[in-house]
């Protein structure tokens, strides 16, 4: 009976491994359009111009730091950033589960007693 339960558990892990593999491919390919959308939004809103102003004219930004931070906060592309970081977070979580399952599936039989 114990072997049957172990085989069912292993089959379930293999199915989950296959599902996570497909989802990793999906979110891995979704990373590229999300990155392109974020970079386009950063350029269109002028966020990068204000951000690099901090490095080119540091004294001026230090003198007017409150206005600078307010302008920087107003130009952050919130939706594009949320989509990008959401895709990255989901991809990394899927990768973590995938790595955990792969360790269990390909471990020797005497080490699979978890």
Image: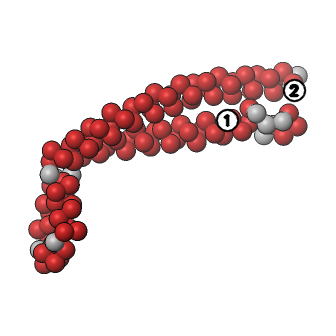
Q: CA distance from mark 2 to mark 1?
A: 20 Å
Question: Would you say 52 lies left or right of 5 here?
Answer: left
Callout 1 crowding tier (Cα within 10 Å): few <14, some 14–19, many ≥20: some
Residue at point 13%, 60% (across, down): 71
Q: Indicate whether 55 appears above or below 17.
A: below
Q: Indicate whether 65 appears above or below 23.
A: below
In the image, residue 43 lies at what x, y percent?
Answer: 18, 47
Residue at point 16%, 60% (across, down): 50
For marks 2 and 1, give the one nearer the viewer: 1
- N-terminal of the pair, mark 2 or mark 1, is 2
Tell which of 30 and 74 is nearer to you: 30
Quadrant in the picture for residue 98: top right
Question: Would you say 109 lies left or right of 101 here?
Answer: right
In the image, residue 72 lies at what x, y percent?
Answer: 17, 59
Residue at point 26%, 44% (across, down): 39
Quadrant in the picture for residue 44: top left
Residue at point 38%, 41% (across, down): 86
Q: Indicate whether 95 appears above or below 50.
A: above
Q: Residue furthest front?
A: 56
Look at the image and name its color scheme. secondary structure
| Residue 36: mark | none
| Residue 101: mark | 1
Quadrant containing the C terminus in the rendered view: top right
Callout 2 crowding tier (Cα within 10 Å): few <14, some 14–19, many ≥20: few
Quadrant containing the N terminus in the rendered view: top right
Tell which of 48 and 56 is nearer to you: 56
Question: Would you say 106 lies left or right of 89 here?
Answer: right
Describe the element under mark 1 as helix, strand or loop: helix
Residue bearing the label numbered 2: 2
Q: Determine if residue 110 is in view.
A: yes
Q: Determine if residue 83 is in view.
A: no
């Amino acid at each position: 009976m114990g072997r049957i339960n172990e085989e069912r558990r292993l089959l379930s892990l293999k199915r989950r491994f296959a599902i996570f593999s497909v989802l990793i491919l999906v979110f891995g390919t979704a990373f590229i359009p999300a990155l392109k959308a974020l970079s386009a939004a950063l350029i269109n809103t002028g966020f990068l111009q204000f951000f690099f102003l901090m490095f080119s004219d540091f004294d001026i930004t230090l003198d007017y730091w409150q206005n600078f931070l307010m302008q920087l906060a107003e130009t952050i592309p919130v939706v594009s950033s949320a989509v990008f970081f959401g895709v990255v977070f989901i991809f990394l979580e899927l990768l973590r589960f995938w790595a955990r399952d792969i360790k269990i599936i390909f471990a020797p039989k005497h080490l699979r007693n978890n």
